[in-house]
Structure formats: structure tokens, C-alpha cells
Image: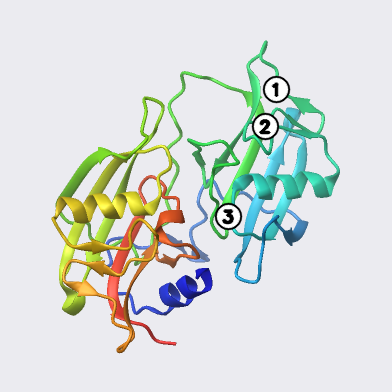
Amino acid sequence: MKKGFKWLFMSLALVALAGCKTPTSEEGPKKLDWQFDVGDDVVTGESAGASDWSPTYKVNLKIVGGEETVLFNGTVTLKSPTMMGSEFLKAAVTEKGLAQEGIDMGFVTTLGDYTNNAEDNIYWSFTVNGASSDWGVNQYQVRNNDYMLWTYAVVDWNAPKPVPERETGDWCFEVGEDEVTGESAGASDWSPTYKVNLKVVGGGDDVLFNGTVTLKSPTMMGSEFLKAAVTEKGLAQEGIDIGFVTTLGDYTNNAEDNIYWGFTVNGVSSDWGVNQYQMRDGDYMLWTYAELVF
């Protein structure tokens, strides 16, 4: 089924309005502040449960211990059915033969010679593309070519979250005026709130939704945002909860003519159904009803 998703989402002819452009310099695309210089360490492998249908992602990973000691700097390429950050971190530190504690449970306490020190408020923590995580590393779904940075440093619990530069491109469609705000099932006081830019385009460029969906959620799966939008609009919907959308509004998948619903996030097609795709704050999700071209 996942291979089917990949073919479907990669093949759809997607049209987005150019709402923003990629920053450039004379040398090419601008390097963002969180894009560290990637070193020469290289790890390649497979995660537990990987199959022929599992995708392969490469993540840029850097681990910096006390006194700026670099424990790992390079790339980790894994075939995985889930792509959780813990898989990439574990592969890197295992390859280096470093001591490790807490990776599998999501709260890292030891990497190499460096262990969390509650007395001095020194802890291991990570960012992905410059943004801190609302999840443990075992619940954070990484994306291909992400930049994951681990640091061992004093933590200021009162400091505001960093607001990193965002990648941009022609996939940044012009966001409309539709607005939905709500809570997903299972949300609690501890759950974060994300705002996603969402556009749903049916046949003949019929715009069914264009705007923002702001949700408090313990998981932030793409299906939650799509469901909130189409429910608010009172549109017919089928397949959202199981991850393979067959109907939105008046538009239903048509196998005879190879016309299907598919989606991209930030211009990239998904390797997962929408119910398994973890969103990030500020993402651009575009749904289109279009002919699949093999």
C-alpha cells in the first residue's frame, strides 16, 4: 500500500501559486542559519521492520558534547518504515561506539562521555532544521534531508522557543482566508498547537478550501488537519482516517481515468498515508484531484 501511495503522490500534476521564493545569492540558494556544515561521517543501514516497501531517507546529523566536542558530524541514511529521529541518532552513536542511554524511550540522558546533569541544568537536547521538538526523539518523524543537531548544554527553561528561518519555494501557495481552529481527540494541556497552511483543489481548479488550520494535538498527523478543514466546510469525505483519501466534496477517485486525490507537504510528495504523516508548525499542505501519470 505504501508503494502505491508513493507512486500516486509523486505522479500527480500539482499546481501551486508562487507565494514565496527561495532566497538566493550569486552562488545559488541561500544557506539557512541552521544548515550546519556537514562533516564526513557516513552511516548507512536499515531500521527494524524495514521491508521492500520502506523508503530510504538521508538525514544530516551533528552531535556536539561539552566544550564543543563533536561526537558525530555527517549523514545517516536509513531504510525505515517509520523514520523516527531515534533511529537515526541510534545508528550514528552505535556506529561510533559511543555510550548511549534513553534513545529508545525518547529522553536522551547519555551520549558518549556526557550525561545529563540536573544540578547544573545541563542536558542533551535537539533541533531539526533549527526548530526545537515538541516530542521525544522516538516520536519525532524526520524527513528526507533534514538537519538534526544535538547539543549538550545548559537549558534555560524560561527561554522562548527559537524561531528558525524557513525554507521557501514555489510550493508556498498564496494562503486564502479560510480559518479553522480546534482540538484533536486526545489533546491535553501538554499538547502543542500548530498552524498549517492548507489548500484543497478539486477538478477544474475548484478550490474547496484555502486557508489555515490551527489545532491542538498530541500527534499532529496530517489527517487531523485535513479532516478539520473539510468538516468545517461540510464537504463529503471518505478515507481520511485510514490514510487513503477517496472522496473530498464532489470529487471521488476514478480508477478508470486514473484520477485520484493526492497531497504534498512543502512541495514534497509523501511516503505515508495522510494518517501517518506528522505535520510541523507552518507547513504548506496542498491536496489536488488530478490524473495520475505513470
Question: At x 75% / y 60%, what residue is drawn?
Answer: 45
Question: What residue is pinned by disc 2?
Answer: 108
| Residue carrying label 3 | 82
Which residue is outermost to the top?
A: 119
Above or below, 78 against 113 in this view is: below
- Observer able to see residue 107: yes
Please indicate whether residue 19 sits to the left or right of residue 137 in the image: left
Question: What is the quadrant of the C terminus in the image?
Answer: bottom left
> Helix or strand or loop: what does disc 1 sit on?
loop
Q: Nearer the viewer, residue 147 or 49?
A: 49
Residue 158 is situated, as x and y percent measured from the top left of the image, at 46, 18
Q: Which residue is tagged 1?
A: 116
Residue at image x 82%, y 29%?
113
Q: Amino acid at mark 3?
A: Thr
Label 2, label 1: how far apart the Cα atoms are: 8 Å
Q: In the image, is residue 252 above or below residue 187?
A: below
Q: Hey, which residue is sitting farthest right in the picture?
A: 97
Whether residues under marks 2 and 1 lie with C-beta atoms below 8 angstroms apart, the answer is: yes
Residue neighbourhood size for the residue with mark 1, other residues' Cα within 10 Å, grouped as few (<14), some (14–19), many (≥20): some
Q: Evaluate whether residue 16 shows in this view.
A: no
Which of the 4 image quadrants contains residue 76?
Answer: bottom right
Estimate how packed mark 3 is, as few (under 14), some (14 to 19) or many (20 or more) residues with alpha carbons within 10 Å. many
Q: Which picture quadrant has residue 155?
A: top right
Chain-order first, disc 2 or disc 1: 2
Residue type at mark 1 is Asn
Q: Nearer the viewer, mark 1 or mark 3?
A: 3
Residue drawn at (37%, 53%), measured in percent from left and top?
222
Q: How many marks?
A: 3
Alpha carbon distance from label 3 to label 2? 19 Å
Image coordinates for residue 32, horizontal then vertical, percent: 50, 51
